Amino acid sequence: MPATIIDRPSPNFGPRRNEARPDLIVLHYTAMENAQAALDRLCDSRAEVSAHYLIFEAGQVVSLVPEAQRAWHAGAGAWGKVCDVNSSSIGIELANTSTHPFPEPQIVALTELLRGVMNRWAIGPERVIGHSDMAPLRKSDPGRRFDWRRLARDGLSIWPEPGCAPGDFMRDAQTFGYVPSDEVDEAAILDAFRQRFRPWAEGPLSDVDRAVMADLAARFPVDRSSSNA
């Protein structure tokens, strides 16, 4: 864990449903003017939102909700078989307006925090996801500027490997963890996937997209991971 964690309890939490244990970590950006504004909102009972942690741009880590409790950070959405993501996850907010890079001190603090959380709850790197992964139509955080590849190099997330043959994009997306529906269609999943794995790609679905998704599905099928429905 980071050397110093500041406690600022939020009233916005409750018990995890069905005795669920966290087996996901969901990363967010705050999309607010500054970290203090985000902290105030996450601790405002009228807002009815929270997270387990907030990391300031300068690297300060604020603990808002105990890890064993259910924070209100994810909202509607799903990942694999997990439909109540709040009950099955730890939520980490990164202070960021959504339009600028994530500063080095913030990423160092995130790296240290992730190691601790993953060790405490035996969460594998394939279970660290973005808000946009589990809610493709509603959310875009942590966004295209977030360096997922760096986390993967540190063993704290995953990254595709080259060489896989193109497959069936939607079938492989579902095997990997994305959950399609009448509303969450191919376009929505393609956008969420690209935000994370091909952040500056544009245009229609390509064989590169199909190959990357095929690799992810082959190496990290969501059914291999434990989950709380």
Image (cartoon, helix red, strand yellow):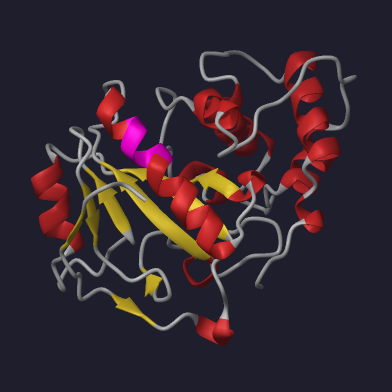
State the quadrant of the C terminus: bottom right
Total count of labels: 0
Out of 58 and 212, give the one closest to the viewer. 58
**Residue 94 percent coordinates (x, y):** 30, 41
Q: Judge whether 13 appears above or below 211 on screen.
A: below
| Residue under the image location 15 percent in, 58 percent down | 41
From this viewpoint, is residue 77 visible?
no
From this viewpoint, is residue 44 visible?
yes
Residue lying furthest front: 3
Name the image quarter holding residue 106.
top left
The answer to whether 169 appears left or right of 114 in the picture is right
Name the image quarter holding residue 181.
bottom right
The answer to whether 82 appears left or right of 84 in the picture is right
Q: Which residues are magenta?
A: 107-111
| Residue under the image location 75 percent in, 40 percent down | 173
Out of 25 and 123, give the one closest to the viewer. 123
**Residue 176 percent coordinates (x, y):** 75, 44
The answer to whether 17 appears left or right of 6 in the picture is right
Out of 44 and 51, give the one closest to the viewer. 51
Q: Judge whether 13 appears above or below 156 on screen.
A: below
**Residue 153 percent coordinates (x, y):** 58, 26
Residue 56 in magenta?
Answer: no
**Residue 225 percent coordinates (x, y):** 74, 57
| Residue under the image location 10 percent in, 57 percent down | 40
- Magenta region's main secondary structure? helix
| Residue under the image location 36 percent in, 69 percent down | 71
